[in-house]
Amino acid sequence: MPSEKVLEAKKALVADLSERLKASVSGIIVNYKGINVADDTSLRKELRQCDVKYTVVKNTMLSRACKEIGLDIADDVLEGTTAIATSETDYTGAARILSNYAKKNKEFAIKSGFLDGEVIDMDKINALAKLPTREVLLANVLGAFQAPIASFARGVQAIVDKGGVDAALADKEQAEPAEETAEAATEETAE
C-alpha cells in the first residue's frame, strides 16, 4: 500500500492534469514508442513554438483526469507508452506537428484526440492536421477583404492617370455619339 505522501502527490498530479485538459481547446494522445532523445528534443521544441504543451503521462493518471472532466477516452487508447499534447489557443498545431512526425517515424503513432472537450476520431485529427496555421488562415481572410478595395483603388488610379474625372467624362461623351451612330446604321441595314 502506497504511503499517504505518495497518494497525495498522485492526487495533485491528476488534479493538475485535469485542469490542463479543461483549459485546452485541443489535445492529441500519442504512443511515443521508438522516439530517440534527439528527435524528442526537436519535436518538443517545435510543439513549444506553437504554444503546445507535451508531456509523457501514466495511463492511469490520464484515465483518472479524463474521468474527472467527463472526457470519454477509450480504454484501449490508454495502453502502452502515452504522451499528451495540449494547447489552450491553437486548435491545429498539435495535430499538424504530431501527424507530420508520425509519417516520418513508423513506431510513433497518434492514438486519439479531443477538441473543445469532445473526443474526436482519426478522420477529424487528420483533417485538423491538414489545415494551415492560424497565421496563414488570417492572411487568407485579410487578402479576401483587401481584394475588392485594391481593385477599386486601381480603378480610381486609372481614371486619375488618364487625366482625371473630366477627361473620363469627355471620353464617355465622345463614345456615346459613336454608339448612337452605330445603332442607327444597324437599324437602317435591318430595314
Image (cartoon, rainbow, N blue to C red):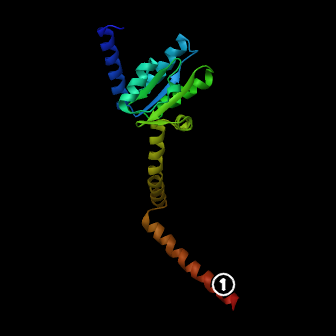
Between 53 and 141, which is closer to the camera in this rendering? 53
| Residue 172, position as x, y percentages in the image | 50, 72
Between 155 and 162, which is closer to the camera in this rendering? 155
Left or right? Give the position of 133 relative to 24. right
Task: Return the residue found at the far bottom.
Answer: 191
Q: Quadrant of residue 67?
A: top left
Residue 24 position (above or below residue 179) = above
| Residue 123, position as x, y percentages in the image | 57, 38
Helix, strand or loop at label 1? It is: helix
Number of on-image labels: 1
Residue 58 position (above or below residue 126) = above
Residue 186 position (above or below residue 33) = below
Q: Quadrant of residue 70?
A: top left
Left or right? Give the position of 20 relative to 156. left
Q: Residue at x 44, y 62 (%)?
A: 164
Q: Residue at x 32, y 22 (%)?
A: 15
Task: Return the residue found at the far front.
Answer: 1
Residue 60 position (above or below residue 96) = above
| Residue 167, position as x, y percentages in the image | 46, 67
* Quadrant of the image containing the N terminus: top left
* Residue to which mark 1 is pinned: 186
Q: Residue at x 49, y 20 (%)?
A: 82
* Residue 145 seen in render: yes
Tag 1: residue type? Thr
Between 182 and 139, which is closer to the camera in this rendering? 139
Between 63 and 123, which is closer to the camera in this rendering? 63
| Residue 191, position as x, y percentages in the image | 69, 92
Q: Quadrant of residue 65?
A: top left
| Mark 1 crowd level (few <14, some 14–19, many ≥20, 10 Å Cα) | few
